[in-house]
Image: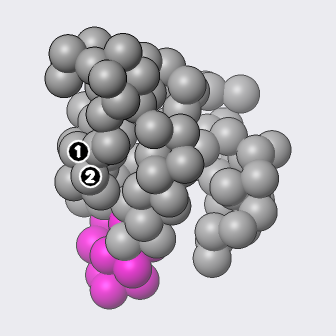
Amino acid sequence: MMLVATPRIVRDYIAAIPRGQARSIVQMRDDLARAHKAEVTCPMTTGIFVRIASEAALEDLSSGKTLDEITPFWRIVDSRSPTAKKLSCGPDFIAARRAAEGLD
C-alpha cells in the first residue's frame, strides 16, 4: 500500500525536526509510510509537497514572520538538491540556514 501524503502532513513532519538536526526526503517518506501503516510513500507527491511547504514558509518570512516562526524547510532540503534550485530563495539561503544550524 502506498501513502499519498498531504501538504499538511509533510509540513508537520518538517516542523517537528528539531533545530540542529536534518532529515532526508527518503527518510521522511519512510517515516511517514511507517506512521500511516503503508509500505511506501509516493515520491512524486512528497517532493511536490516539500516544495509547497517551503514556498509557504518563504511567504510567511516575507510577510514578517521570523525564522523561528516558519517551517524550517532547510532541515530537509539540501542546498545541493534539485529542489533547492527551484525554490524562490535559491540554494544560497538554504546553505546559510543549514550552516547556521551546523547541518553541513
| Secondary structure character of the magenta stretch overall | helix
Q: Position of residue 19 (x, y in %)?
A: 38, 30
Give the residues in magenta. Answer: 57-66
The residue labelled by disc 1 is 9
Viewer-closest of 44 and 50: 44
Dot 1 lies on which element?
Answer: helix
| Left or right: 74 in relation to 39 | right
The residue labelled by disc 2 is 6
Residue 47 lies in the magenta stretch: no
- Quadrant of the drawing holding the N terminus: top left
Whether residue 21 appears in this view of the structure is no
| Residue drawn 36% across the image and 15% down it | 39
Q: Position of residue 75 (x, y in %)?
A: 50, 37
Q: Are marks 1 and 2 in contact (CB under 8 Å)?
A: yes
96 is higher (above) or lower (below) than 102: below
- State the image quarter where residue 25 is shown: top right
